[in-house]
Image (cartoon, rainbow, N blue to C red):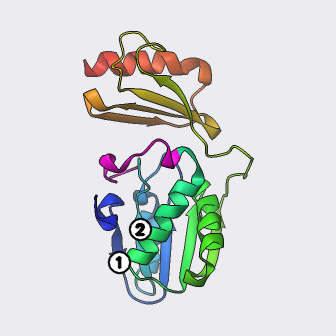
């Protein structure tokens, strides 16, 4: 099993009260670069890459675990436990605002505040990924291990272990997804 810090490519900078900065889907911790420059002199900032994003460890991906936001919330609690954090100010962007809400509900004793930046609506099925393509039956000529997903906000994810490839596209028109995947596969073959 991969170490929690390595799995999430954790970065810690600054001194002072602890702020955990968590990006939304389709982003990585680089999203916070301008905020870090302004806050690191007064706060201890912890930045992570959610599994499946940025420089997180791709071996950590588990389709079942990450088919709901509760899988990501469990990761947040693992990070907080691994770093033995207390009185954390959780700052979540987009869908991570909802991930933070789930984590703080699960273990409120670890968190001082929850800051939600442009939170995504918490619809009954928001954040769930619909695995549309499992093997060659859905897309002939595609490796049997490849999967794709379309989630809320027209976010598309293509995972092809045979090509060592993960592609994330945001706000793609659903009708353009097949053409995107075809062009992507042609480019890496």
Looking at the image, the residue that sits furthest to the top is: 140
Q: Residue drawn 49% across and 49% down?
A: 65
94 inside magenta stretch: no
Q: Residue drawn 40% across and 85% down?
A: 41
Quote the CA–CA distance across marks 1 and 2.
Answer: 9 Å
Q: Tell me: residue 122, above or below residue 169.
A: below
Magenta region: 53-66
Camera sees residue 134: yes
29 or 161: nearer the eye? 161
Q: Which mark is residue 13?
A: 1
Q: Residue drawn 45% across and 66% down?
A: 34
Where's the N terminus, which quadrant? Answer: bottom left
61 inside magenta stretch: yes
Where's the C terminus, which quadrant? Answer: top left
Describe residue 95's horizontal placement relative to residue 64 as left or right: right
Task: Give neighbour class at mark 1: few <14, some 14-19, many 20+ (Cα, 10 Å).
Answer: some
Disc 2 marks which residue?
47
- Give x and y (percent) for residue 126: 67, 45
Q: Secondary structure at mark 2?
A: strand
Q: Tell me: residue 115, above or below residue 176.
A: below
Q: Quadrant of residue 5?
A: bottom left
Looking at the image, the residue that sits furthest to the bottom is: 16
């Amino acid at each position: 099993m991969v170490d929690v810090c390595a799995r999430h490519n954790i970065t810690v900078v600054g001194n002072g009260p602890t702020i955990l900065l968590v990006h939304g889907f389709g982003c990585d911790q680089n999203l916070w670069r301008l905020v870090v420059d302004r806050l690191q002199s007064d706060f201890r900032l912890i930045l992570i890459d959610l599994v499946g994003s940025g420089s997180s460890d791709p071996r950590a991906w588990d389709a079942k675990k990450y088919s709901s936001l509760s899988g990501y919330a469990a990761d947040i609690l693992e990070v907080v436990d691994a770093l033995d954090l207390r009185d954390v100010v959780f700052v979540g962007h987009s869908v991570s605002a909802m991930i933070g809400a789930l984590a703080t509900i699960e273990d409120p004793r670890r968190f001082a505040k929850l800051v939600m930046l442009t939170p995504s609506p918490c619809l009954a099925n928001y954040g769930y990924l619909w695995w549309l393509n499992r093997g060659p039956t859905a897309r002939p000529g595609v490796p049997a291990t490849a999967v794709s997903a379309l989630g809320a906000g027209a976010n598309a994810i293509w995972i092809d272990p045979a090509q060592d490839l993960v592609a994330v596209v945001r706000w793609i028109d659903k009708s353009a997804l097949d053409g995107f995947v075809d062009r992507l596969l042609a480019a890496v073959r």
